[in-house]
Amino acid sequence: MKKIRSIKISVSLILAGVMGIAGAVILFRDAPDQTLVFGNNPDLPTLTFYTSAMATTPQLPFWSAIRKGSILEKCNFRVVLWKNLDDLRGIMLAGKGDLWLGDTEGFARAHGAGAPVRILMISGWRKFYLVSRNPDITSISDLHGRELAAAPPGGPAVSLLRSLKEEHGKKIRFSEMEPRQLALMLMDGRMDTAIVPEPLLTSLLLRDTNLKIIENIEDYYGRRTGGLPRMPIAGMAVHAKTAEKYPELIASLLDILLYEGKKLEEDARDAVHALPEAFSAFIPQEMVTASLERDRVMVKSALEAEQEIRSYLHILMPAFFNGDRSDFFWQTP
Amino acid sequence: MQGCIPFIFSMGLMLTFWGFLTFFMGTGLVPSPVETFSCLAKMLLGASLWENVAISVFRGLLAISTTLFLALITGILAGLSRKTMSLITPLVVALQATPPILWITLLMIWAGTGSTVPIAVVIASLYPPLFFTVAQSVASLDPRLFSLAKIYGVKNYRLLKDLILPGIHPYLLGGLSYALGSCWKVTAVAEFFGSSRGIGAGVYWSYRMLDMPQLFSWAIILVGMGMGIEFGLIRPLRRRALAQRGIDAQA
């Protein structure tokens, strides 16, 4: 009996030891997914770009430039996927990576907490839609006293509606959830109204013909602020140290992205094929193509869009610009 | 063969319950056992699952070794001196009262996601019980033995090797078996929130993609590994500890 016990302990310890050593090798080797390494010119610097496979449109100019090779003449890229907006904020606060694709509010919150974030450009402007199959809901004002589902958790649409709602005393109970969880709940009838981003909207509209678009959140924002029907929702930011170390490189990257963005404003469908294969597991390319009908590509440098960013953040984070935030915007060297 | 009966009975009961859930809730929410096991088989043939498991095991082992090392040093010091014990106890109690989710949140802000979060959270969660186990078992050693050792000028190293470590050994095994059981679960939770690799992260991605067969497969892997640790390590260690205590009591 004692011998069996010793054998059990020894076998378990050996197995755990072997697995542990293998785990250490995998972690310390730190080899990125080879499908997400772009460029191998040893004379060029390699930048780490943190992005998400779920936010496709704002990064189309980047992938288009990767496919054409123009951006790879400047540097190599190692692309890492973040899990969610909380993960992205943690990554920025810890100062990991050189470039980040993310939401403007997240960049501002991270900057406010001392993260070395310099916003480079805005490439996501029209993303969020209020959808419902409830005939009583005809506008955002009908949401008074109701529960409203929204995706993704921590997304800017909810922050915005919360901020605007307070002005008018509206009481919307927000229930934030992951996009697929929200889709499931909408599909099986556990809820009838939600705020969804593109390209999830396209996928839902294709599956449920009773679901109707009630309002575009950016149109609502434009009406409420008396400005353009768009919001500087998402874009790209650069690590302060990277910007300081490679000022010319960052300037050329921005130029390339602005150029690609301009080209994609007309028709971005072809650029969808430039998205990495790994992204298809999250959102099929056909869905991204279909979503471009509503989700247009437009790239503006953060400096060019500074006033819009300031107005937008003034609603979401009224105290953000109280201090000196001049270093929040990346400046041309 | 007789020893397998409880296992077969429990598994049969679980599969029946699972089948009922699939029937009532639909395969969209609860995939059938057949669908789940076929997904699990596919995952077992791929490298990704083994990489994630190996990463979690490494993090768990590193965390528990560090915790044990820290608990031994501080626990022995506290067990040998009442003053040290009274000084350090409030701090360790505060640590014990801190929920893992708070550590996860803070560490995600301070260190970003990666291995730091699961390793540090396991250390913070398991250090207090291991510290108290070591400190209290050292304090319960016969003080006359220490007096004798002092009279005969026994060196500290021999005191540790021949008196303290053998004396606390059975209690330490008991404490370690508890820590091993908890380490596994805490690592998975910390990875779910604070890491993009590892078993917990695998669960997160399945949840995010709402891939229910994959989510259930990860659940089977987690439960299976937990059972493996319980039957392969924790129970034998606990029995060895009990047998050791029995021998000590007889002596």
Image (tube, rainbow, N blue to C red):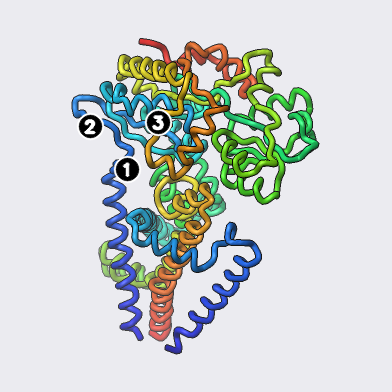
Q: Is residue A71 left or right of residue A178?
A: left
Q: Classify 10 Å Cα crowding around label 2: few (below 14), some (14-19), many (20 and above).
A: some
Residue A6 lies, in percent from the top left, at 32, 78
Label 1 resides on the chain identified as A
Which residue is nearer to you in this view: A195 or A85? A195
Query: Is disc 1 in the same subunit as disc 2?
Result: yes
Q: Which residue carries the number 1 mark?
A: A33
Quadrant of the rendered structure where residue B239 is?
Answer: bottom left
Q: Which residue carries the number 3 mark?
A: A95
Three-letter amino acid code of the residue under disc 3: Gly
Label 1 and label 2: CA atoms lie apart by 14 Å
Secondary structure under badge 3?
loop
Secondary structure under badge 1?
loop
Query: Is disc 3 in the same subunit as disc 2?
Result: yes
Regarding residue B135, the answer to whether it shows in the image is no
Q: Which residue carries the number 2 mark?
A: A40
- Upstream in sequence: badge 3 or badge 1: 1
Q: Is residue A75 left or right of residue B198?
A: left
Three-letter amino acid code of the residue under disc 2: Asn
Which quarter shows the C terminus of chain B?
bottom left
Label 3 resides on the chain identified as A
Residue drawn 48% across the image and 80% down it: B7
Q: Is residue A173 left or right of residue A312?
A: right
Label 3 and label 1: CA atoms lie apart by 21 Å
What number is the disc on residue A20?
none
Residue drawn 55% across the image and 17% down it: A309
Q: Classify 10 Å Cα crowding around label 1: few (below 14), some (14-19), many (20 and above).
A: few
